[in-house]
Image (spheres, rainbow, N blue to C red):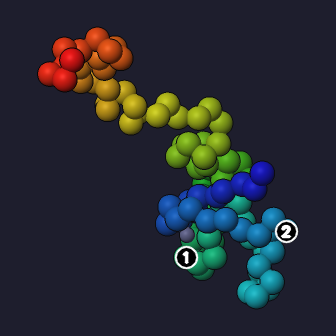
Amino acid sequence: MRSIYVCIGCAAIYLPPETMVYPSLGMTASPAHCTQPGCAAAVREAVALSGLSEDRLGELARRAIGLEGEPRRPRLNRRATRGRRATAAPGGGRGKLR
Ligand SMILES: [Zn+2]
């Protein structure tokens, strides 16, 4: 499965080639930032400040937004069922046509 990455600089979600090289740009993809020059600089700074590797920072960012690690619990289902009456059992209702 391909990894989806999140940019630490601008929070964009990106999907680099599996080879981690952009042939048209002649650049290597980073696990922590997209191709914008400002983002590359932001990550260089983050690496310098935190002492963590680019790989590790990228992993933490992916984990923080739920792209990696334990899947987030879906909230939609719970909200949809709350406050709604239970569904009637089939054949249990009093219909006029009966
Ligand atoms: Zn970016």
Compared across the picture, whether 33 is left or right of 77 comes to right
Please state the horizontal and vertical placement of residue 47, each as a whole percent of the image. 66, 57
Residue 95 occupies quadrant: top left
Marks 1 and 2 sit apart, C-alpha to C-alpha, by 23 Å
User: Label 2 CB, ligand 1: below 8 Å?
Assistant: no
Please state which of residues 71 and 59 is positioned toward the viewer in this rendering: 71
**Could you tell me which residue is drawn at 32 percent across and 26 percent down?**
81
Identify the element where label 2 is drawn.
Answer: loop
Amino acid, disc 2:
Thr
- Assign ligand 1 to one image quadrant: bottom right
> Which of the two marks, 1 or 2, is nearer to us in this view?
2
Counting every numbered tag in the picture gives: 2
Please state the horizontal and vertical placement of residue 28, each as a whole percent of the image. 78, 74
Mark 1 and mark 2 lie on one chain; the one further toward the N terminus is 2
**Could you tell me which residue is drawn at 24 percent across and 24 percent down?**
84
Q: Which residue is mark 2?
A: 19
**Could you tell me which residue is drawn at 52 percent across and 34 percent down?**
72
**Could you tell me which residue is drawn at 49 percent across and 31 percent down?**
73
Please state the horizontal and vertical placement of residue 91, each as a whole percent of the image. 32, 15
User: Label 1 CB, ligand 1: below 8 Å?
Assistant: yes
For residue 48, above or below residue 36: above
At label 1, counting other C-alpha atoms closer than 10 Å, the crowd grade (few under 14, some 14-19, many 20 or more) is few
Q: Which residue is mark 1?
A: 38
Compared across the picture, whether 91 is left or right of 36 comes to left
Please state which of residues 92 and 9 is positioned toward the viewer in this rendering: 92
Residue lying at the far top in this picture: please name it.
92
Please state which of residues 92 and 36 is positioned toward the viewer in this rendering: 92
For residue 58, above or below residue 37: above
Amino acid, disc 1:
Gly
